Amino acid sequence: MNGRKKGLVILGSTGSVGTQTLDVVRTFPDLLEVVGLACNRNVELLSRQVQEFLPRFIHCNASEDEKSQLLPNYVEECDLIELVRHDDVDIVVTATTGDVAIGPTLAAISARKQIALANKETIVMAGELVTSLASAEGVDLMPLDSEPNAIWQCIRGERATVSRLIITASGGAFRDTPLNQLSSVTPEQALRHPTWSMGQKITVDSATLMNKAFEVIEAHWLFGMPWDDIEIVIHPQSVIHSMVEFVDGSVKAQMSKPDMRLPIQYALLYPDRLDNPKIDRFDPLATAALTFQDWDRERYPCFEMAIGFAKRGGTWAAALSGANDAAVDSFLKGQIGFLEIEQVIRAALDDHESIQEPELSDIIRAGQDGYDRVCELVRS
């Protein structure tokens, strides 16, 4: 390292990825500095984070009364665009859910900030727009999710000779549930992920395999891979996070115990690798076996549906993302069954009118339309 601290802004600091990002900052306080924190409404946790990390700027959507009672007056509140463009910011960590991070991400890229990307919707909904701007501005898009981060690690230092990407999936909470029982599973059961501790939406997406569809879309845009050269495989142990096959037949795999702090640290401290005693090491003897299996199309109908829509281009993926948000939310509220998630998404997108070469406003509108259409179907 060159001795200068990297200045961070964390969008979504009170969520799962945001809190783990701050844990990495705790481990490397001489290398990382929190310039700004942003959250939705969890002002109590944000207040504790402000007291510990002393950022100069915050953004929070809680009421003015809540903020005045819990947040110190020495921090300056600003909008997300202003926050990510500040001169002292080197890296913007996008750890929100939904489309709220897309505009700030584009603004940060235009300001030539590096992007540590955990918000899937940014690339799923606006992949072509975001990646083309990043390329033009010379900005790195550093994925934080374990699977695209693993691909990124595997291709570092390699020439453009990749022939195939293999993304692993845990299979989620229902990978071993008999198919005839899936119609009656509950949200509580869906949230019991077998290997990872994550937020509610991503845990349900893991159970439907929608998260893998989104990761295939991410890989297509982030690494410029053709759709047909990206595969997924069920890997119950979640030790191998992705594999990269090269044209000569060699395969690189990134392996580690399931811990989001490792890919977060790799991105924030890149290109350096430093010891973090808080992260458990992989023990091959304790793991004993690493197994793989094909994914069941009947068990995971969301996957092929999602890829099919994404391949159409335009605003199809944006509408898909919004529809999935609403469907998962409806399932978690007990308004629809687990198997109905795929059904309402497909029905919602039946009448979507895609816009080719969309602008940001078109993308946001398509996502909202997909969300609203699912809500209408659930109510009817």
Image (tube, rainbow, N blue to C red):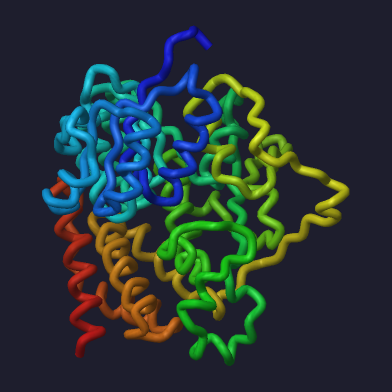
Image point (57%, 55%), residue name: 231
Query: Is residue 268 depicted above or below 145 in this figure?
Result: above
> Picture coordinates of residue 39 (x, y %)?
28, 46
Front residue of this view, candidates 157 and 23: 23
Whether residue 81 sits left or right of residue 322 in the image: it is: left
Determine the image quadrant of residue 51: top left
Determine the image quadrant of residue 371: bottom left
> Picture coordinates of residue 21 (x, y %)?
46, 38
Query: Is residue 70 depicted above or below 160 in this figure?
Result: below
Whether residue 358 sits left or right of residue 218 in the image: it is: left
Front residue of this view, candidates 260 and 108: 260
Image point (60%, 41%), residue name: 163
Query: Is residue 31 depicted above or below 380 in this figure?
Result: above
> Picture coordinates of residue 45 (x, y %)?
35, 48
Image point (66%, 41%), residue name: 245
Front residue of this view, candidates 305 and 38: 38
Image point (41%, 34%), residue name: 116
Task: Indicate the quadrant containing the C terminus: top left, top right, bottom left or bottom right.
Answer: bottom left
Whether residue 253 sits left or right of residue 366 in the image: it is: right
